[in-house]
Image (tube, coloured by chain):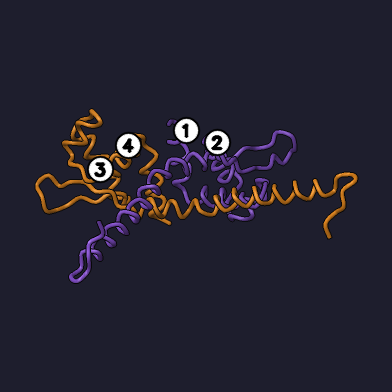
Chain colours: A purple, B orange
Amino acid sequence: MESLNQTFAALADPTRRGIVAHLIRGEATVSELVQQFDLTQPTISSHLKVLESAGLISRSRKAQTRPCKLEPDGLQALDAWLERFRTVWEGNFERLDALLDDLQDRQPGKEKKP
Amino acid sequence: MESLNQTFAALADPTRRGIVAHLIRGEATVSELVQQFDLTQPTISSHLKVLESAGLISRSRKAQTRPCKLEPDGLQALDAWLERFRTVWEGNFERLDALLDDLQDRQPGKEKKP
């Protein structure tokens, strides 16, 4: 619950969503992100801290460049939260289909199915 | 882009996520939400303002009770943003399958497929 708050808050910023989208392709260093987003290193670092604290990315401790990596768990939690709404959207269409079938069956000159 | 910022920010609060989830079942008045979430009317009203301004809910102007209704567009925009990650998750599994198939083909005593 708490982590879902952090996930949503972290993704409320377009640069942070851009970083997450960029990391789909694979790991990236801070320098690469600085170049990609045309922002200063402190700005990128501060965005990375928010993303890391929300569990959306992780940073390797091994190399001096500490490359950033996408952690799918956070996005998958968000996806799981949305799942119930998708069920309703799909359910609504099924209900709509059933309603339209029923209305068609009730048209004059057509027998209603038993 | 701007509205996606608002969507994410609005959903970074557990009460607001709760209200959105509650409205899946259908419209609700402020009084019903006050009762459901055991919060004061000003607190619920302030949450509703944030949700309405993010386009996640709408409020009827007709009745005195001004019932709240879920507006699926906001959640569907969020779902569309997540779509690319789902593609990668699914793509990754396909790539993993291909890799495992390839490794199996390379096992000693087994011919590599042309």
Q: Which residue is mark 3?
A: B48
Identified by mark 2, the residue type is Gly
Kindly check if marks 1 and 2 are in contact, taking CB atoms under 8 A apart as contact: yes
Local SS, label 2: loop
Q: Earlier in the sequence, mark 3 or mark 4?
A: 4
Residue for point 54% across, 52% down: A18
Q: CA distance from mark 2 to mark 4?
A: 22 Å
Between the residue at mark 3 and the residue at mark 4, the CA separation in whole angstroms equals: 11 Å
Of residue A43 and residue B34, the one placed in the foreground of this image is B34
The percent coordinates of residue B78 (x first, y second) are 43, 51
Q: Residues within 10 Å of mark 4 (few under 14, many from 20)?
A: some
Q: Is residue A34 visible?
A: no
Q: Are marks 4 and 1 on the same chain?
A: no
Q: Chain of mark 3?
A: B
- Residue located 38% across and 48% down the image: B7
Q: Position of residue A38 (x, y in %)?
A: 59, 55
Q: Which residue is mark 1?
A: A3
Residue B103 lies left or right of residue B80; in this view the side is right
Residue at mark 3 shares a chain with residue at mark 2: no
- First along the sequence among labels 1 and 2: 1
**Would you name the residue on which mark 4 appears?**
B18
Q: Which amino acid, by three-letter code, is at mark 3?
A: Leu
